Amino acid sequence: MDSFDWAGFFADKSELDREAYLFLDYYIECSGDPKLAAAHFCAEQSTAQWRRVGHDEDLRPRFGARVITLEVIAELPAFSYGLSQATKGPISACRVRIAQPHANFGPRLPNLLSAICGEGTFFAPGIPVVKLLDITFPESYLAHFQGPQFGVEGLRARLKAYDRPIFFGVIKPNIGLPPDAFTALGYEGWLGGLDIAKDDEMLADTPWCSLARRAELLGEARRRAEEATGRPKIYMANITDEVDRLSELHDLAVSRGANALLVNTMPVGLSAVRMLRKHAEVPLVAHFPFIAAFSRLPHFGVHSRVITKLQRLAGYDIIIMPGFGERMHMTDEEVMACVQACLEPMGPIKPSLPVPGGSDWAGTLPLVYERLKTVDFGFVPGRGVFGHPQGPRAGAASIRQAWEAIASSKTLDEYAKDHPDLAAALVAFGKQNRQRSENEPQPRGGKK
């Protein structure tokens, strides 16, 4: 491209019709002139060869993606991850914001992803390292999507649970139990104070624990727990499967007593979730298998915040995500970005309940609440409930007692003096966590 050619892929944001564009933030590593690389990046995402032979026309005003801002943040000796050996000129790390005309692909998630994460994005000349960091939608685009059916307020209304987190329990062990044993664990958890007892992401419709039988037994147990406690309860069944079975499994699970449904987003696809949302009668819940494969590398792929926004757009009422702590391999900042993506204003799209999780128990609840600074989250222990030394009822009670301590401005140790379920959790899980920390390999050059 000469200077006349590539100049058409830049624009002043103030001169654009903001309702006609999505705004995309990328990290890129490019060789040569960053401005020329950014122009190629926009061309490959939109018009590509924008002139037709024999015609005097410029397709960029209607179809072209435009660079709004370009910042060179570092000069590099080589591309990250050894992705390319062929370079033409110096290598620059850049932050670039792109305005992408959404009329190019319309309100269709597969077409959106083909544009912003497709061949044109990850195979642009001289740009082997790309990460999509964020996406901003105009209201004109959001108006085409249903988003969550219930959202945070609708979920709270169903559970009659206000001014506190929503308490989940992942029934463990996650696969391998027959329906009777699985049901007994869920029932005890509800009696102890869980709002929601859920399947784990790996347990779907299996020969040893069929969805039909599991939903039937857990549905009946849920109703008994509601009568015993006087509180609404939810059984969340995992219906992850082939796309053409999702509506069928929704009907099967709901008719037998499940009143929320879990789906592993990326394995089934965002478009499949959007289809299910149009059919769903109960809250839909996202789990995060396969997302790390897109998001974990700091300079390549798609930031998990973007995937969170797309899950909310597709129609999830609840979004389970990796939470705090070393086991989940996510920084606190990334967890917070995903939580914010669930709750921040998004035009007509309702907020989704964020559920940051991983190795949680009563002892981690104060830290999660302190970091989030809101009660609009779900707390989702597995072992912390179902591995409690006195059983799931005591494990669930320990979680509720931990919240009571927080709400009364007491430390867990203070509150545990009069609450044996919490005291037992502090002894059992606190000791296990200390032993795990002591047994982990120490980094070279000093103590952990």
Image (cartoon, rainbow, N blue to C red):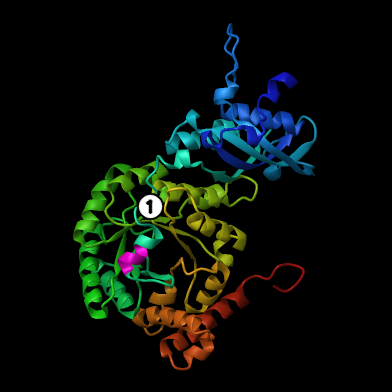
**Quadrant of the frame with the N terminus:** top right
**Quadrant of the frame with the C terminus:** bottom right
Residue at image position (70%, 68%) is 443
- Amino acid under label 1? Pro
Side of 65 relative to 208 (left or right): right
Where is residue 38, by image quadrant?
top right
Q: Residues within 10 Å of mark 1 (few under 14, many from 20)?
A: many
Residue 136 in percent (x, y) is at: 55, 44
Where is residue 239, by image quadrant?
bottom left
In this rendering, is residue 381 above or below 87? below
Residue at image position (41%, 83%) is 389
Q: Which residues are magenta?
A: 155-159
| Location of mark 1 (residue) | 148
The front one of 416 and 204 is: 416
Q: Is residue 86 visible?
A: no
The front one of 263 and 48 is: 48
Residue at image position (38%, 46%) is 268
Classify mark 1: helix, strand or loop. loop
Residue 348 in percent (x, y) is at: 43, 48
In this rendering, is residue 286 above or below 438? above
